[in-house]
Image (cartoon, grey):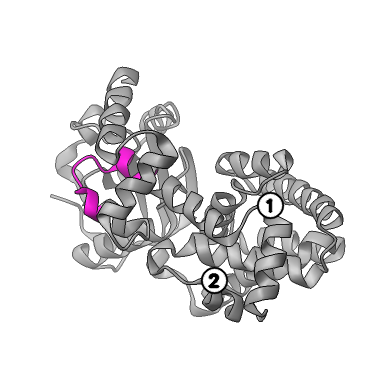
Amino acid sequence: MFPTLNRLEQGLLLHDLLHRSNGIRDVSWIDPDFALMVDACTWLVDLNDFDEVDLAKLRKLDPNRWSVVIFQCLSGEHRDGLAKSLSSYMQRYWSGGAMKNGVENIRAPNKRGRSAADDETRLVEQWRSYGWLWDDDRLERLLNETQRLQAWPRTVSEWLGHTAAGWRYVGGSPEIRQLAEGAEYVATGAEWGSWSLEAAQAWRTRLRQSCCPEAVLQAVLKAIDKIAGDLRSGLSQVEIAREVNLSRSYFSVMFKSVIGKTFSAFERDMRIEKAKKLLADSSFKPIYWISEQAGFRDEGYFSRVFRIETGLPPSEYRRLSVERERHLC
């Protein structure tokens, strides 16, 4: 049985990145009977029972297989409530490829103070404003504030994941695409600082190339956030333009100038990429579910567009992805 949570000051959350069937049983020095299952690939164990030998073994876990988070301040939480809280936390911060491998030490999500949570929400909104891209003083203040709150990586990672996902499809700028591809390897505050400085430089170059005002570039980047953050909702170009306070026609022209492709082409690329990831990671989900999650309203239309863009129907793409994964294992 899982230990009494009233004495659980530190918990070790292990997530199997490869989703192997044996799961935590492959970690021979952890008794599965003393682990709380959060989901099919994730377990919580009591870190208080670990000695120095166990901790040394923990540091040697294969980072390509295991993502490990040490949660602080878990005591006083009901067993079922804790599992639900951690599961919700994982869905929020570890979805869409945001999960990091290796070991990380953070506070439990259910024990965060209201003021700290408010500070971090405000911090993410400041990052999302994108004013720091061309204001060095603002960027320095944000980096210092992020470090002060010890907010990296979880409170910023969701925004970074959405941003990087959208930046991959910016046309005519290999520097920005490289930044997007490298975002998934950002795992420390120092790396975040270097990444954000490079991002500022790349977008300043893009700003000069597109000849659009800073405020318009900010609006376009906010639009990318909205598209990438909720593909399933299917916000129209008119709705997105309204949310960033631009007319539809002006937004359409500026979006293409900054991004290098039309709004509809950009959104289609995002949806196809989302579908490809879901097909590779969700081998038992029906195609209509994949279609809905990626923001396509009709399964038939999704299958046609997917085949045009990838050369394969969704079912065949999934089959090849599964075979490739098995070969790697």
Q: Is residue 26 magenta-colored?
A: no
Q: Nearer the viewer, residue 195 or 37?
A: 195
**Is residue 175 something one can see in this rendering?**
yes
Looking at the picture, which amino acid does disc 1 mark? Answer: Gly
Residue 206, image x and y in percent?
Answer: 79, 52
> Residue 128 sits in which quadrant?
bottom right
Amino acid type assigned to the residue bearing label 2 in the image: Gln
**Residue 53 place in picture, x, y as percent:** 38, 28
Q: Which residue is mark 2?
A: 237
Q: Residue at x 51, y 57 (%)?
A: 267
Task: Check the image and report above or below for 196 versus 58.
Answer: below
Locate the C terminus and report the quarter of the image it occupies. Answer: top left
The residues colored magenta run 277-289
Q: Which residue is mark 1?
A: 260
Q: In terms of secondary structure, what is the magenta stretch mainly?
A: helix
Left or right of residue 211: residue 156: left
- Residue drawn at x 29%, y 40% as measured from the top left: 314
| Spot occupied by residue 100 in the image (x, y as percentages of width and height) | 47, 42
Q: Is residue 282 magenta?
A: yes
Label tally: 2
Which residue corresponds to the image point at 66% horizontal and 80% vertical from the top-left? 247
Viewer-closest of 232 and 100: 232
Q: Quadrant of residue 55?
A: top left
Viewer can see residue 47: no
Q: Residue at x 85, y 64 (%)?
A: 135
- What separation in Å lies between label 2 and label 1 (alpha carbons)? 16 Å
Q: Is residue 47 above or below residue 316?
A: below
